[in-house]
Image (cartoon, rainbow, N blue to C red):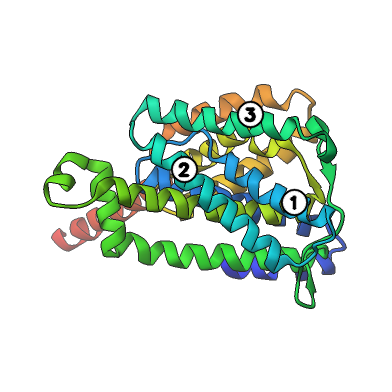
Amino acid sequence: MLAVLLLALPAYAALTAQPFLVVLFARIAVLAIAALSLDLMLGVGGLVSFGHALFFGLGAYATGVLAQHGVASGWVQLATALAACALIAVVTGAIALRTSGIAFIMITLAFAQMFYFFAVSLREYGGDDGFALASASRLGAVSLGDPVTLYYVAVGLLIALLLFGRRFLKSAAGMTLGGIRINERRMRALGVPTVRVKLAVYVVAAMLCGVAGMLFANLTQFVAPSYMSWTMSGDLIVMVVIGGAGSFVGPLIGTLVMVLLEEGLKSVTEHWMLVMGPLIVIAVLLSRRGLIGLAYALDARRERRERNRAAQGGAR
C-alpha cells in the first residue's frame, strides 16, 4: 500500500498544484535508501557505523567531479561511484572490522572525518562551500535533472530494496548475518568466516549508500563536504533507530517521520531542533524497536483483546 501511495504521489501533486511534494518525497526516498543501506549493517549485522555518510558523500562527489569535467553519463558516474565506494569500503572495512563495539564506531568515524577534511581541502571543487552540479546525470535518454524522473528512479530503487530485504531476512545469508550479530563466537565455532561475511555486508551497504549519494547530488544540484560529515551519519542512525532497526521497512518509516517532522517544525519555529530532540527521546523510550516495533506491539495487543472477547463470548 505504501508503494502504491508513493508511485501515485506525482499525479496527486500535479492535480493539486503542489510540485514541491515531488521534491520533498524524492528527498525522503533518497535518504531512505541511505538509511536502509545502514540498516543492513546496523540492524541485521549489528555493525554500528558512525561514518556511513562517507559513502553517501563519495557517491555525490563521484557524480559532481565527473560532471565538472564534462562527463554527464549517469552510467559512467554510477560505475565510478560504485567502484570508489567498494574500494574504500574494502580498505576501511578490513581495518575497522578487526575491532568491535566502541572501537569499531570510532574507527569508522575517523575514516569518515579524514575524507571529510580531504573534501574541504579541494579548493578547485569549492572547498568547504561545495560546488554546484555542472549538469544532471543522464541515463540514456533519461535525465535525472527532471524532479519527477528522479523521484520515480529513487522510489523504484527503494521498492526493489524493500522487496529484496524481505527475502534477505529469511535467506541463509540473512540468517547467518543475524547469527553473527547475536553470537559471533558460536558462528565461528560452526565454521562461518564471520569477518569475511561482515566485510561483504559492509561493502554492499557502502555501495548502496553511494547510489543514494549520486541521486542526492542530482536532487539538490549541489555537492558539499557536509554530505559525508559525522552529523549526516548521525541523522542516518537516528532514522534507522526511530523507524526500527533490522526490519528494512523501519528505516523508510523513520526517514518519512524525521523529514516531515523537520519540515513541519521549521515552518512553525526557527528553534525547531529544541522540539525535535525531546520528540526523538520520547519515541525511543516508547519502543526500543522503533515505530515499526510499536505498531507491531499495538497490533498484537489488539489481537489478544479480540481473542479474549471471542473466548468470553464462547464461554457464555
Name the residue located 81 percent from the left edge and 56 percent from the top edge. 67
Q: Which of 242 and 279 is in front in this view?
A: 242
| Residue topped by disc 2 | 91
| In the image: residue 142, left or right of residue 154 | right
Query: Is residue 89 visible to the viewer in this orientation of the structure?
Result: yes
Pointer 3 or 1: first along the chain: 1
Q: Distance between the residues labelled 2 and 3?
A: 36 Å
Query: Is residue 183 visible to the viewer in this orientation of the structure?
Result: no
Q: Which mark is residue 276?
A: 3
Kind of residue indicated by mark 2: Val
* Rendering coords of residue 70 (x, y %): 85, 60
Q: Do the residues labelled 3 and 1 touch (CB within 8 Å)?
A: no
Which dot, 2 or 3, sits closer to the camera? 2
Kind of residue indicated by mark 3: Met
- Circle 1: element type: helix
| Residue topped by disc 1 | 217
Name the residue located 28 percent from the left edge and 50 percent from the top edge. 178
Within 10 Å of disc 1 (Cα), the crowding (few <14, some 14-19, many 20+) is many
Which dot, 3 or 1, sits closer to the camera? 1
Residue 3 placement: quadrant:
bottom right
Pointer 2 or 3: first along the chain: 2
Residue 188 placement: quadrant:
top left
Name the residue located 83 percent from the left edge and 51 percent from the top edge. 133
- Circle 3: element type: helix
Q: Which mark is residue 253?
A: none
Q: Quadrant of the N terminus?
A: bottom right
Kind of residue indicated by mark 1: Ala
